[in-house]
Image: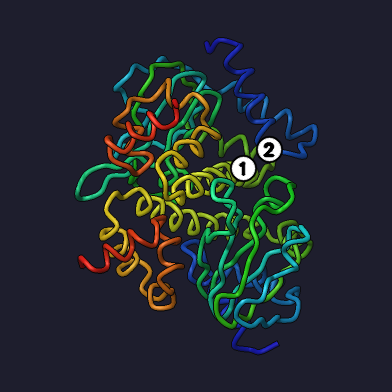
């Protein structure tokens, strides 16, 4: 049985993401949040891998996770998930395709998740349509927009500041190698930017 | 309204992975709700989007610049180039009910169509397939954003230029050097050095 506090956190996060809920929808999202099962994920473990066939929607209760896109030449950080956010493979959940990304734990934490089929069945039972999926799409649309804004800064210190706007603890929580890769700068540039920022 | 514009509008939906003939009544409904086309010359602002509102816009012809005020440089800079046959919206208003922080300027002569939000909402009520079309359309936009983000994270300017050449050849042809530098997130000096090298 999942600890009540995490299910409540999932429910509150759902309410934050989806606006204009009527009473039936509230019942539906309460039921959906109760279906999330928790597990403790250790640093270095995965939320999903490239071979995953089952699509799940995750709620990061605490900890930090990095999503990587696999390319021929290696993998690249696409984004970070921090506490109290939803995470999912866009490829499996939205495009019904094999994942092109994998998500690895950078700082251990508690995660709750629900299989997409459970979500679909509740959506169908309560006639929610694609309401929840639309909300997930909006989350990622906003995240990509914010990340693009960060990456359009041509100076390392500006990129760092822009990333801190979204993720204030970025310097304390992320290993420097991942941070440099996320910001699209070399480790040397990152250290210069950090030095500049601390002046 | 020109029939070629309507054809382009339909083509957009027909190209989505979830499209089937069953979606045609919903698309017809949207077509009937479209407002007249608007034409703008290069450099003209789409003032309609600056006032807020949740309407959808479909660019049938020409290239559009999405601009933002860079807080770090206090300059207005390029956020994105929108190619023909794309939908664009005011995301701040649509998703967050906020004042728009971005604005749009015609990069070339453009023609766009306006789809009122109320028409989309009505289509959503009448045709369950509409939600699928919306999701599929936004998913395609996201794929494109993810791809560009990876380019922006490349540390080599030459690699970034090559990405634009391969992935966005039409945009590459249209952009002047200053716009290209902003599109790939590098200074103009870095761009010129990279172009000399390659």
| Of B14 and A63, the residue lying toward us | A63
Residue drawn where x is 62% and y is 59% of the image: B129
Q: Secondary structure at mark 1?
A: helix
| A78 relative position to A168: left or right | left
Against A191, residue B198 (above or below) is: below
Against B15, residue A113 (above or below) is: above
> Residue B72 location in percent, x, y?
54, 46
Q: Secondary structure at mark 2?
A: loop
| Of A35 and B41, the residue lying toward us | B41
| A6 relative position to A77: left or right | right
Question: Which disc, if any, is residue A135?
Answer: 1
| A15 relative position to B153: left or right | right
| Of B158 and B137, the residue lying toward us | B158
Q: How is the image coloured?
A: rainbow
Residue drawn where x is 76% and y is 76% of the image: B35
Quarter of the image where the N terminus of chain B is located: bottom right
> Residue A38 location in percent, x, y?
48, 17
Question: Which disc, if any, is residue B41?
Answer: none
In the picture, residue B9 is in which quadrant?
A: bottom right
Q: How dense is the environment of label 1, judged by Cα within 10 Å: few (below 14), some, or many (20 and up)?
A: some
Q: How many marks?
A: 2
Circle 2 sits on which residue?
A18
Labelled pair 2, 1 in contact (Cβ < 8 Å):
yes
Residue drawn where x is 29% and y is 49% of the image: B155
Cα separation between marks 2 and 1 = 6 Å
Residue drawn where x is 41% and y is 14% of the image: A40
In the picture, residue A75 is in which quadrant?
A: top left
Residues behind callouts 2 and 1 on a single chain: yes
Q: How dense is the environment of label 2, judged by Cα within 10 Å: few (below 14), some, or many (20 and up)?
A: some
Quarter of the image where the C terminus of chain B is located: bottom left
| Of A141 and B28, the residue lying toward us | A141
């Amino acid at each position: 049985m999942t600890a009540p506090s995490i299910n409540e956190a999932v429910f509150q996060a759902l309410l934050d993401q989806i606006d204009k809920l009527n009473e039936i929808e509230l019942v539906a999202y309460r039921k959906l949040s109760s279906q999330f099962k928790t597990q403790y994920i250790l640093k270095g473990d995965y939320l999903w891998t490239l071979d995953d066939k089952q699509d799940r929607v995750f709620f990061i209760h605490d900890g930090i996770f990095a999503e990587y896109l696999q390319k021929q030449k290696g993998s690249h950080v696409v984004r970070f998930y921090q506490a109290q956010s939803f995470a999912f493979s866009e490829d499996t959940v939205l495009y019904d395709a094999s994942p092109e990304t994998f998500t690895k734990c950078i700082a251990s934490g508690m995660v709750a998740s629900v299989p997409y089929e459970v979500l679909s069945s509740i959506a169908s039972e309560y006639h929610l349509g694609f309401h929840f999926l639309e909300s997930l799409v909006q989350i990622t649309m906003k995240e990509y927009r914010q990340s693009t804004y960060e990456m359009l800064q041509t100076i390392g210190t500006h990129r760092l500041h822009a990333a801190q706007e979204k993720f204030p603890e970025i310097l304390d929580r992320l290993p420097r190698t991942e941070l440099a890769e996320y910001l699209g700068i070399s480790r040397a540039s990152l250290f210069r930017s950090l030095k500049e920022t601390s002046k | 309204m020109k029939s070629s514009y309507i054809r382009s509008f339909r083509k957009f939906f027909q190209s989505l992975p979830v499209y089937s003939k069953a979606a045609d009544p919903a698309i017809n409904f949207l077509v009937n709700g479209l407002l007249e086309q608007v034409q703008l010359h290069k450099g003209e602002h789409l003032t309609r989007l600056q006032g807020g509102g949740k309407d959808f816009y479909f660019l049938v012809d020409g290239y559009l610049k999405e601009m933002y005020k860079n807080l770090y440089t206090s300059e207005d800079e390029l956020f994105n180039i929108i190619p023909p046959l794309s939908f664009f919206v005011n995301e701040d208003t649509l998703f967050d009910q906020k004042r728009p922080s971005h604005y749009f300027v015609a990069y070339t002569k453009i023609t766009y169509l306006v789809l009122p939000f109320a028409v989309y909402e009505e289509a959503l009520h009448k045709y369950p397939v509409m939600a699928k079309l919306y999701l599929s359309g936004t998913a395609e936009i996201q794929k494109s954003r993810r791809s560009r983000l990876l380019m922006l994270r490349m540390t080599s300017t030459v690699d970034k230029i090559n990405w634009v050449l391969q992935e966005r050849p039409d945009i590459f042809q249209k952009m002047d050097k200053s716009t290209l530098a902003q599109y790939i997130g590098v200074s103009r000096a870095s761009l010129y050095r990279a172009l000399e090298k390659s």
